[in-house]
Image (cartoon, rainbow, N blue to C red):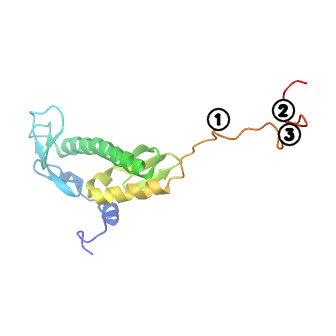
């Protein structure tokens, strides 16, 4: 099975342990993002990493080390993942008629894309942002569907209220009126 025909989940797990990741980090390298790729551009004109079209401009000098490039690119990618995944979670939760669960990013090299944590949180692998939006939305929708129902709590004021099981005002039972 070639790398191109793997399922996205399998590809995520198998590619997590690349032997020489430093060779991937240089000016002009491709960075997987939302099912496509961004070209890394070292650009000291910017103070922060900026996505411009199909390029990710990193505020680094041309002589930056592969480790510096990787750190800046992955920091941007993680921040973008948190922002976009939170948006998708809020949209899917609203469609499901529930409040949005909290989001935590997972940095594990191997694991599921989205895991339910307790009754009100999702843990998403930050590399999920590399997949196409349809795959991301499907993973999030499945996780939201796996969450337990929202706890609406007991509505004291909405519940019917009686002091006794069989009030009978004629006999004086169930009434707190003074005689």
Residue 69 picture location, percent across and down? 18, 43
Distance from the alpha carbon under mark 2 to that under mark 1: 20 Å
Q: Residue at position x 31%, y 42% from top?
A: 83
Q: Is 21 situated above or below 165?
A: below
Q: Which mark is residue 168?
A: 3
User: Mark 3: which secondary structure?
Assistant: loop
The residue positioned 91% from the left and 37% from the top of the image is: 171
Which residue position holds label 1? 157
Q: Which of pointers 3 and 2 lies earlier in the amino acid sequence?
A: 3
Quadrant containing the N terminus is: bottom left
The residue lying at 31 percent from left, 60 percent from top is: 135
Q: Which residue is mark 2?
A: 175
Residue 106 visible: no
Q: Would you say 55 lies left or right of 77 here?
A: left
What SS does tag 2 mark? loop
Q: Residue 121 versus residue 62: which sits nearer the camera?
A: 121
At 41% from the left and 44% from the top, the residue drawn is: 103
Q: Is residue 61 above or below residue 3?
A: above
């Amino acid at each position: 099975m070639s790398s191109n025909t793997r399922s996205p989940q399998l590809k995520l797990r198998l590619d997590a342990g690349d032997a020489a990741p430093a060779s991937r980090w240089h000016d002009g390298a491709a960075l997987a993002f939302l099912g496509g790729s961004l070209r890394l551009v070292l650009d000291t004109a910017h103070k922060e990493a900026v996505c411009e079209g199909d390029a990710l401009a990193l505020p680094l000098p041309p002589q930056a080390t592969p480790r510096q490039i990787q750190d800046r690119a992955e920091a941007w990618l993680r921040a973008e993942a948190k922002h976009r995944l939170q948006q998708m979670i809020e949209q899917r939760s609203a469609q499901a008629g529930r409040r949005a669960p909290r989001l935590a990013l997972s940095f594990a090299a191997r694991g599921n894309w989205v895991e339910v944590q307790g009754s009100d949180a999702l843990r998403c692998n930050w590399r999920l942002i590399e997949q196409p939006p349809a795959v991301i939305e499907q993973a999030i929708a499945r996780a939201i569907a796996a969450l337990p129902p929202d706890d609406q709590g007991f509505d004291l004021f909405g519940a019917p209220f009686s002091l006794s099981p069989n009030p009978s005002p004629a006999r004086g039972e169930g009434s707190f009126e003074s005689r």
